[in-house]
Amino acid sequence: MSNRSRTQIAIIGAGPAGLLLGQLLHVYGIETVILERKSRDYVLGRIRAGVLEQGTVGLLDEAGVAARLHSQGIVHHGIELVFGGARHRIDMKEATGKAVTIYGQTEVTRDLMDARDKAGLTTVYEAEGVSLHDLDGDRPRVRYTEAGVTHEVACDFIAGCDGSHGISRQSVSPAAITTFARTYPFGWLGILSETPPVAPELIYANHARGFALCSMRSYTRSRYYIQCAADDRVDDWTDDRFWDELKRRIDQEAIDHLVTGPSIEKSIAPLRSFVAEPMRFGRLFLAGDAAHIVPPTGAKGLNLAASDVHYLARALREYYAEKSSAGIDDYSRRALTRVWKAERFSWWMTSILHRFPDTDAFSARIQIAELNYLVGSRAAATALSENYVGPPF
Ligand code: FAD
Ligand code: DHB
């Protein structure tokens, strides 16, 4: 082997889960190496989530990477629901005392990458053929190739933060994993545009033509989504077609205020619920999308990655500082308890807001009744709000 090195924690994947774990462990005095398959620019080019729970913001504070978030993030105290052509506000702050912050995943990632660079910590981008070894012994190892040279990193633990198609979960015997999955029969077509947001808060719309969401990244940059067919291709959707369809699904006030413009990014995301249990296999821990996927409705994906990282970072700190395995032994149970709350919420938000192939007149009326209950009942609005702002870590 040409190049051997050692670290305490080898982290696979430089998405939000891997980078945040690396930064928190650095704060706790624990050494990490991150191996990422793609280039830094590629990772930063992926447009994904935009809503951060208060707990996620707290964790980014703890990691010392939240200065730009606090100066540029937009704090939202409520969301709006559109159905039957009318708009209704849910006041989450009044219901829970908590808020969410609008700050793009791209920016979170950039802040974490910058902090890691500044601290002189090792991240290997374009690490090819990452493979995991000896997960059941007490000296696991990770191998990869960089620019044609094979490297091996020996470590105490491996954190699999490499997303849903990563190598970490695939390195475990299928017999050791139980999976739970649901695929939804539609996708989300999203566009980003340099236009001011249509409204101060996010608008989630239930419409006979399908779901729509008006979101934002800043006061000058908007993010909009519409439900589309699962097999639609981005090329099927010109910008004009997108804006026309969005206008059909939102309320009149939003139509009147909507500023359209050219898209600067356009993509289609499939919707899927997925959980792999457990989240620990010997010396390998899974965190974030490597272990679970939620449909995007309710913006839980990134926040769940953050809560996994919170449990895992604390467990590892306990292991090194107090020589106790209690935290790492309980990691999977603790993380999964919260994961399933988010799985339930995202599935439920998806089910009340989208048009399904089997949504008949009866089911459509039931959706409207549920939405009316949400905006008319303090108890129901509180239940939605508690989940939207995120259950405590
Ligand atoms: P990722 O962000 O997927 O990071 C994993 C990293 O591991 C990647 O950088 C990947 O390149 C790397 N990797 C993979 N395989 C390997 C390997 N073999 N070796 C080394 N590195 C590897 N959530 C929301 O809340 N709202 C949204 O609007 C939203 N939109 C989304 C749109 C899309 C298209 C997708 C895919 C997800 C979206 N999500 C959204 C979910 C959210 O972005 C994820 O939950 C979040 O990115 C999870 O972070 P992560 O670090 O666990 O995984
Ligand atoms: C965004 C995505 C979501 O899934 C959501 O529920 C709210 C906002 C976004 O990308 O801005």
Image (tube, grey):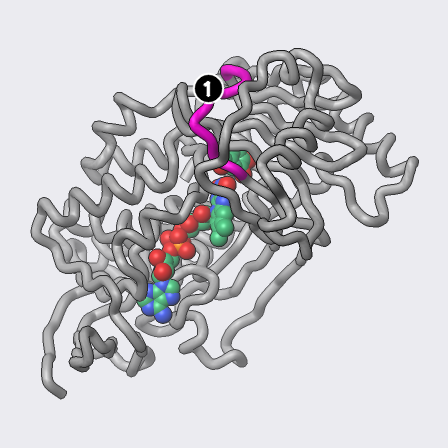
Whether residue 360 is visible to the viewer of this picture, yes or no, is yes
| Residue bearing mark 1 | 196
298 sits left or right of 186 in the view: left
Instruction: Say which residue appears at 20% left-offset and 74% top-offset.
Output: 146
Q: Quarter holding the C terminus?
A: top left
Q: Nearer the viewer, residue 368 or 176?
A: 368
Residue type, label 1: Pro
Asked if residue 313 can be seen in this view, the reply is: no
Q: Position of residue 76 (x, y in %)?
A: 45, 20
Tag 1 secondary structure:
loop
Q: Quadrant of the N terminus?
A: bottom left
The answer to whether residue 265 is left or right of residue 214 is left
Q: Residue furthest right?
A: 361
Magenta includes 208?
A: no
Residue 266 higher or lower than 257, as above or below: below
Which residue is at 11% across, 79% downward?
4
Whether residue 166 is situated above or below residue 217 in the rendered picture? below
Check residue 192 for magenta coloring. Answer: yes
When asked about the image quadrant of residue 107, the answer is: top left
Say if 18 sits above or below 364 in the image: below
At x 33%, y 80%, the residue is 136
- Magenta residues? 191-200
Q: Position of residue 301 (x, y in %)?
A: 48, 46
